[in-house]
Amino acid sequence: MATRNPPPQEYESDDESYEVLDLTEYARRHHWWNQVFGHSSGPMVEKYSVATQIVMGGVTGWCAGFLFQKVGKLAATAVGGGFLLLQIASHSGYVQIDWKKVEKGVNKAKRQIKKRADKAAPEINNIIEEGTEFVKQNIVLSSGFVGGFLLGLAS
């Protein structure tokens, strides 16, 4: 007996609405998705040798670590430089900051983040469980990735 999936649900937030994507329906319509990510794909242990897994994990980890390092430096420089320029402008009298309004805005942002984080907790736990299961099934690939990531950060 075939069951029909309900239409995607839409959740409304303060500013935006999000559509929930049903991946099972997507996988049925796109066979490549099921071959790559489906249950029949199996763990990497069944497909590639240990050396291949370590190399694949190491290379992807190094690339991710290298990019993480470069983007992190760029973001830190941009935020720090912007803060420094704002402080210089404030100290010189070009900009006057209404600290009560800043505090009110920060408190409002805290409340919104807390409310959204409480709603997202089950989804985050599900993602963590799936990630943990992937690491357990592909421990060699994951180890290579971590090693490559650390080397990428050090590069």
Image: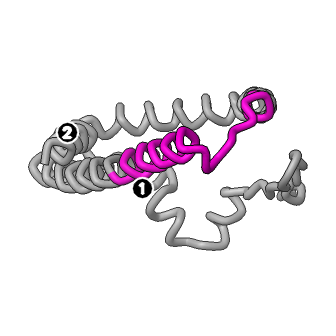
Residue 79 colored in magenta in the image: yes
Q: Is residue 106 visible?
A: no
**Residue 14 marker:** none
Callout 1: SS: helix
Image position, residue 142 (x, y; %): 27, 40
What residue is shown at x 47% (from left), y 64% (from top)? 35
Give 50 or 123, whichever is nearer the viewer. 123
Query: Which residue appears at 55% of the width and 71% of the height?
Result: 31
Give me the C-alpha separation between circle 1 and circle 2.
28 Å
Label 1 vs label 2, nearer the camera: 2
Amino acid type of the residue tagged 2 in the rendering = Leu
Q: On the rendered structure, is 106 left or right of 63?
A: right
Q: Please determine whether, in this image, residue 44 is positioned above or below residue 104.
A: below
How far from the left and from the top, in percent, is residue 81? Answer: 41, 48
Q: Which residue is mark 2?
A: 150
Residue 90 point in image, percent of width and height: 58, 42
Say which of 37 and 153 sits in front.
153
* Residue at 25% over, 45% down: 45
Residue 126 or residue 63, whichever sits in front: 63
Magenta run includes residue 38: no
Q: Which residues are magenta?
A: 74-103
User: Residue 64, position in %: x, y?
Assistant: 29, 52
Q: Which mark is residue 41?
A: 1
Q: Nearer the viewer, residue 127 or 149?
A: 149
